[in-house]
Image (cartoon, rainbow, N blue to C red):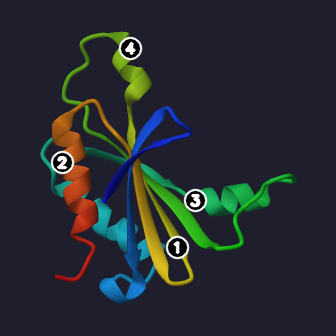
Amino acid sequence: MRQVLFQEKYPIYTLEIDKSETTYSSVDDILAYFRTKIEAHPVVAYIGIFDHYAHTKSLKDGMVSDRMLDAKNILFCFGKELPNPSVLSIRPRSIGVAEQEDTFVVTFLEAPNPMANEAMEQWALSLRNK
């Protein structure tokens, strides 16, 4: 898993998984796995799925990379505290999953809560066959 600054300002985690390294065969399979992790966590609330690929393809001027076959986000919230209105600006969380010909790419924005980062990183890394 790599940690990089996307567009020189957004700290993101990125994991590329060759399809031969995982038993999951689609973006939907991976999102279903993430949903089980979200629903099993005592603090996390599941929100929904956003089909970013379909949305962008449907736009008149929408552009999707030719390499991408599918791309969706699963949305959820680790919110255990709401000390002030500013916290709303950094929630909810999202994990993006993109399918390319030979790989799945899992990405998420670094959360201010280390526990959330650790959980999302562990969930993503466990997609690989052991």
Q: Which residue is rendered at x = 24% and y = 44% of the image?
A: 117
Q: Which residue is mark 3?
A: 51
Q: Which residue is rendered at x = 52% and y = 60% of the image?
A: 72
Pick the quarter of the image with the N terminus.
bottom left
CA separation in Å, label 1 and label 3: 12 Å
User: Which sits earlier in the primary sequence, circle 3 or circle 2?
Assistant: 3
Q: Which residue is mark 4?
A: 86
Residue 80 picture location, percent across and down? 19, 29
Q: Identify the secondary structure beneath mark 2.
A: helix
**Foreground: disc 3 or disc 2:** 2
Horizontally, residue 53 falls left or right of residue 20, namely: right
The quadrant holding residue 109 is top left
Residue 99 is marked as 1
Q: Which residue is mark 2?
A: 118
Residue 48 picture location, percent across and down? 43, 51
**Foreground: disc 3 or disc 4:** 4
Q: How many marks?
A: 4
CA separation in Å, label 2 and label 4: 23 Å
Asked if disc 1 and disc 4 are in contact, CB closer than 8 Å, the reply is no
CA separation in Å, label 3 and label 2: 25 Å
Q: Nearer the viewer, residue 22 or 53?
A: 22
Visible residue check, residue 23: no
Q: Would you place residue 80 above or below residue 122 in this image?
A: above
Asked if disc 3 and disc 2 are in contact, CB closer than 8 Å, the reply is no
Q: Residue furthest left?
A: 42
